[in-house]
Image: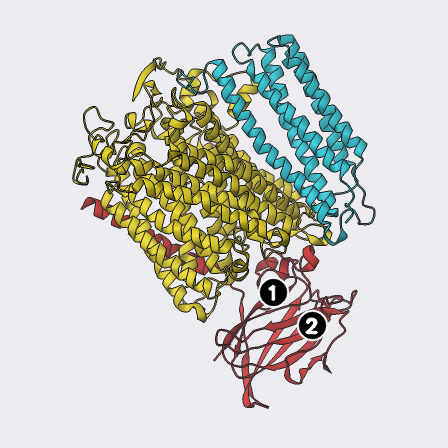
Amino acid sequence: MTSPTPALVAGHLDPEAARRMNKLGVILLIVGDAFFTFSLVFTYLYLRGLNTNGQWLTQKGAHPVSATYTWLVVLVVAASWLAYRWAERGGTDKARIVLGAGLASALVVLDLGLQVGQMVGAGFTPRDGAYQSAWMALAGYHVVHLLLTLFLGVAIVNRARLGRFAETAWHVTMVGYWWTWLVLATVIIAAATSLATTVPRA
Amino acid sequence: MKSLVGIGATVLAGGIALGLTGVAVSRAQSDPSTVTAVVKGTAQTPQGTVPHAFLELQTWPDSMAGPHGKDGGPHPDWVSYGPGTHLVLPAHSLVTLTIQQYDSGEEITNHYFAKVLGTVDGTETVDGKVVSEVDPTAIGHTFTLHGLAQDGQDELFVNAPLPAIPDGAKNLANGYPEPHVVTFSFLTKGPGEYVFNCEFPCGDGTYAKFGGPMSTRGYMSGTVTVTS
Amino acid sequence: MTTSVTAAPSPPVAPVTAGGIMRHLNVVTGIVMGVLLATATWWVTSSTFPVLDEGDHKDDAVTILTLVAWVIGFLIGVGAFVGPARWLLGRDLTVEDEHYLAGKDAGVARYFRFTTDHKVVGMQYLVTTMVLFGFGGTLAMLIRTNLITPGSRFVDPATYNSLVGIHGITMIIATIIMVSGPFGNFILPIMIGARDMAFPRLNALSFWLLFAAVPVLISSLFLGGISTGWSAYAPLSDQANRGMDAFLVTIVTFAISTGVAGMNITTTAVRMRARGMTWSRTPIFVFGTVASVALGLVAFPMFEVAMIELGMDRGMGAGFYDPSIGGSGWLYANLFWLMGHPEVYVILLPAIVALMEITPVFTRKPLFSFTSAILGIMGIAGLSLFVWAHHMYVAGWAPVLGGPFMVTTELISIPTGLLFLVLLGTLWRGRVWMRLPVMAVYALLWNFTIGGITGIYLSDIPVDQAMHGSMFVTAHFHYTLMGAGLTGAMGALAYWFPKMTGRMLHEKAGAIGFWVAQVGFNVTFMGMFAVGLAGQPRRVADPGTYFRVGNLISSIGAYTIMLGMLTFLGAIIYSWRAGSVASASPWGARTLEWQTPTPVPLENFEVLPVVTQDFYGYGEDGHRAAAGAPAPGTPGGPGAPPPQGPDAPPQRVEVGAP
């Protein structure tokens, strides 16, 4: 282990040292976020398994959300990730980053619309029961993820447009880590909410 | 020396700060207004001749007339006992409590509390009629005083069900319907501190109506001090 | 031990425009913006939100959103989002901007704005921690005052329960940050030979998030209190009054702060250690602190989720914890304790490793079995994630798992025992230089033995069935969190005080305060063990005459603690203002933070150090080698001359002489 920093302040390290440091930081943030996401998924699966008072999706008119729609949300996120990966693999090619990250961000906006649409059109509110509460929390958190990703995506487009990546090209990679986690989290949430809807048999 | 003064000043300032905080907190607590039973003569009971004390309470469908301040305080729409929820009763006395019940109701969760318990003869009068229980499907509230024999004080248990005002009853000029008047008497024993509450879940809709006024002191629950 | 390899370039003169808009932002603009946004949010939500047909959900929703708006507004006003905004716009900070943000030449003002220098953040944490302890301690005194005599009615039962709840959460927050906040920020980067934390702006963010959470916590007092106790068990917390809204916003804010700090400290320790500082040469304080904050990073999100779900229940009428629509209190209990037990070690580990850092210095011996210490820390951190359900033995949840959880809980006493052995082994046959910092080691060993062993009792299901919910439990966890945790933090403060403030802590007053508090502590909580064994339940304002004597003793003990703590505080305040000036290395310690000048310059090191051996080489064979250890102040030795003056204790230059 060596100390790589000859600089005055930590924010201005040599690019490789900064990349290594930021990579670990981003991974740790993702770990924290993963535990948050897992806790929400745990909530969903636990309340389903517990089925307190036989109330999981048994109220009059209660129904699970459409699994097809849920996987459509995943599909769009996955497409945005592919677009971003394409941009990332272009190295410091400014036009490619702008195009790829721009397309990825546009797909995130589309996904936001889809997710909000699913929530509004779900036909229930969190007040209707445990399933409805747990699903809304997961869908809501996906919206939060998308908003954060949109911020990152737009920033990458703008920075690439301004040619800000001479020494900080690794920023694109860091955002790529997050984007990958976004897809994983979306798949986990979709798998839980679409494959485990009705109460398991005793 | 300088250090002693500095450190001593810190200790003193800390002590003063604590004292002031204590006084402020102690005084700032919500203190539901006290209702004291008034002794008017004596009564013959199986325990002999004892002082006879009288007390009046109401059960309101909101907090406007209770002890909650201007415009009903922070929760004007919560049901509430009134005029206070800290009752002071004399020890070794016959207490006659009259409650004007203004609220509607429905079936009580636990039918046991639809019976009159712990009063003289196990009865109460509802609008002048002597009863030993009321219809459990039409209960407005109950006055239930719980007290186990502990900490050197005597056991005290009284339950008086208060029938519901029917839905759609006409309001009088004061904005409330004609109340049911429920009267019952019970004997206090030695001094002690007790709690009373309503056993009909009449609170916040959450949790089978045990929230809100049912779980906040000063609305559908209170304390009873039996003094020597 | 170290050689210089890399000279720092001369710092450029910052232009007057450095910092940009940050020049105009500080804590005052933060408060103004926070209040404005909160007021606007309150107005909009109050007038637009529908009243749901059941419950007071609108009130709760309005309260939660108003408090969240305060936090966001404050962060905007203090400048927390300027960095991300500039990154988005492609206007990256220049070196001059970063110097400005680091508080270069800013004097005292740097403590009141979004300053990124880790030393400033460390001092901010230190003062905030002391304020929190003052607040929580005041509430503790009110609790004990109420319990002086049965039926005292000093406060009413509802107020009493609120005092207990707010005291609990205040002290939990304070103890979580008490070591990793001040010393993890101020000392750790210097200790590993870095110029700052890995992410200085996130470092400032974690502090100002905490700062924003404090008024929210205090506001709970005016919103009806936290009548549930700090554990806020559902469904009680679903029904509690609006003080609970303040509680949950506090927790979510604090959890984000802790998560960010955990990521930052871990990255700093892993990536920014000085050249040559291999893991085996890394000070034990770094290991313990990193284990603690990394544990927090995975544990606190679960609490955060529990609180967000509580917020949805209260503000939207959701059904996470409401059994009538399919929710369950067990969900809350699991999420809470999945955080709650690791959190105990989040508190304890930094305090214990701080004392491990101190002990070799004052015994002039190497740390006994460095490897055992590492194994102990790793064992505790790992096992702590698998013991949570011992808090739920009698909750009816998964009784079949009671046995396994009993085993894991009892297993954790093994790595904990290792840490005891390391401390004892380091003291063993050492010629101890008996100064205030090392006194804390003895106090911790006594207190933590009692706290630890009673913990083993409570981990046993049959005992727990009898003792749960009693004051015995309260006494047990005070022996661990206060008797061990806070004691360790006091030792750490006494040890690093000279480096952080440039002055020596008044030894005599500090020691008197410390020991008076320790005696008071043992009186208080021994009394509490007694009434707990006799059956006194927790969170009961007037537990009855049967417990009169025990409660009176505990209350006398509590007033003694107060006297001791105020004396200790007095020593801190006096010494900070007028104590004798400290040299760069008054203890003759060898870790890197003592190799820098005091006060520590902005860049910490003029030249970055290279580490060529470990920091505990006071003598590789204990007693004999201790004799050879250079005394503080020996020319060419590790330390500079010890303090001189009326308050300076006599020097033990003959330490370890054969």
Which chain is displayed in red in the rendered image?
B
Q: Quadrant of the N terminus of chain A?
A: top left
Q: Residue at x 37, y 43 (%)?
A: C421
- x%, y% of residue C453? 43, 53
Return the residue nearer the eye: C273 or C58.
Answer: C273
Q: In screen coordinates, is C562 left or right of C39? A: left
Q: Label 2 is found on which chain of the structure?
A: B
Which chain is displayed in yellow in the rendered image?
C
Identify residue for label 2: B113
Tell me which amino acid carries mark 1: Gly
Q: In screen coordinates, is B37 left or right of C185? A: right
Quarter of the view holding residue C495 = top left
Tell me which amino acid carries mark 2: Phe
The color chain A is rendered in: cyan
Identify residue for label 1: B66
Question: Does residue C388 appear anywhere in the picture?
Answer: yes
Q: Is residue C385 above or below residue B85?
A: above
Q: Earlier in the sequence, mark 2 or mark 1?
A: 1
- x%, y% of residue C613? 33, 24
Q: Is residue C360 above or below residue A95?
A: below
Return the residue nearer the eye: B48 or C222.
Answer: B48
